[in-house]
Image (tube, rainbow, N blue to C red):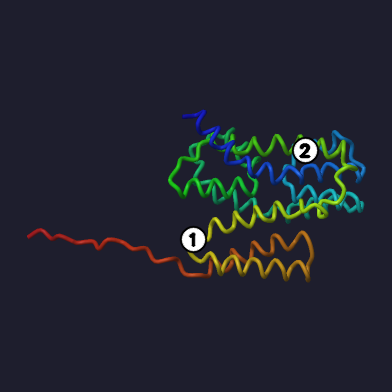
Amino acid sequence: MTQDDFWQGVRGGFPVMVSASPFGALFGALAIDNGFSLFDAVFMSATLYAGASQMVGIELFGHKVQPWLIVLSIFAVNFRHILYSASIARHIRHFSAVQKFFTFFLLVDPQYAETEKRAERGEPVTFTWYLGFAMIIYIPWQITTLLGAIFGQMIGEPRAIGLDVLLPIYFMGLVLGFRKRDNWLPVVAASSLASIAAMHFVGSPWHVSIGAIAGILLAGCLPLPKRHEEPVTLEHEV
């Protein structure tokens, strides 16, 4: 059962790996262009492990921005991970402290979405399944970062061959996977509009957190869905 869970996780994470690999290579190439060594590029991927945040960090490093601002910007992009960890905490209560450490370190967008979906289907969220799903993404991410750092000049412009649309399409699929949840449409609409407005008036990377907060606020204001419960019959003793 343990091996089955692991390979089930690997199969589930394989499409994510295919979509994310070009961006791992792109990060490696950008890191070298901004003065990183091969070791620096791979070390950042291995320790930070957050594609969008890595791209933001590299861009700010290249403009010689103050370190505190780089940290704050990365925090803004990764703010949603606080919400992710709070959401999946109820599914991993049975994990040990060490397992929880690795669980939260490896927590990325698709990992969160698939964990929630698995729990909703009534399937057990085991650490073995979680690790299998994570490793098929994490390990290739390091390899493609290294390859991008070595052969970065051969990648060219990702937009020219359509690589830039792979992850957005995948993430759109993740969002649509939750469409059957109550209040899904108004929350997604509010989050999207707030993010777009913030992108124009505030700028990147703050639009990510602002969009997330807008969706959370609306979700908190909307009424809870009505639950259909069986009528309770009270029997009185005579």
- Where residue 143 sits, quadrant-wise, is top right
In the drawing, does residue 120 fall left or right of residue 78? left
> Residue 13: x, y in percent?
61, 41
Check disc 1 and give the amino acid type: Lys
* Residue assigned mark 1: 180
> Between disc 2 and disc 1, whose residue precedes?
2
* Residue assigned mark 2: 144
> Residue 229: x, y in percent?
31, 61
In the drawing, does residue 153 fall left or right of residue 96? right
What is the quadrant of the C terminus in the image? bottom left
Closest to the observer, 138 or 170: 170
Q: Secondary structure at mark 2?
A: helix
**Residue in the picture at 86% in, 38% down:** 149
Check disc 2 and give the amino acid type: Thr
Separation of residues labelled 2 and 1 (CA atoms): 35 Å
**Residue in the picture at 57% in, 66% down:** 187
- Where residue 41 sits, quadrant-wise, is top right
- The relative height of residue 57 versus residue 92 in the rendered view (above or below) is below
- The relative height of residue 192 versus residue 46 in the rendered view (above or below) is below
In the drawing, does residue 211 fall left or right of residue 160? left
Closest to the observer, 22 or 215: 22
Question: Callout 2: 10 Å neighbours few (<14), some, many (20+)?
Answer: many
- Which label sits on residue 32? none
> Residue 159: x, y in percent?
81, 55
- The relative height of residue 163 versus residue 127 in the rendered view (above or below) is below
Q: Secondary structure at mark 1?
A: loop
Question: Callout 1: 10 Å neighbours few (<14), some, many (20+)?
Answer: few
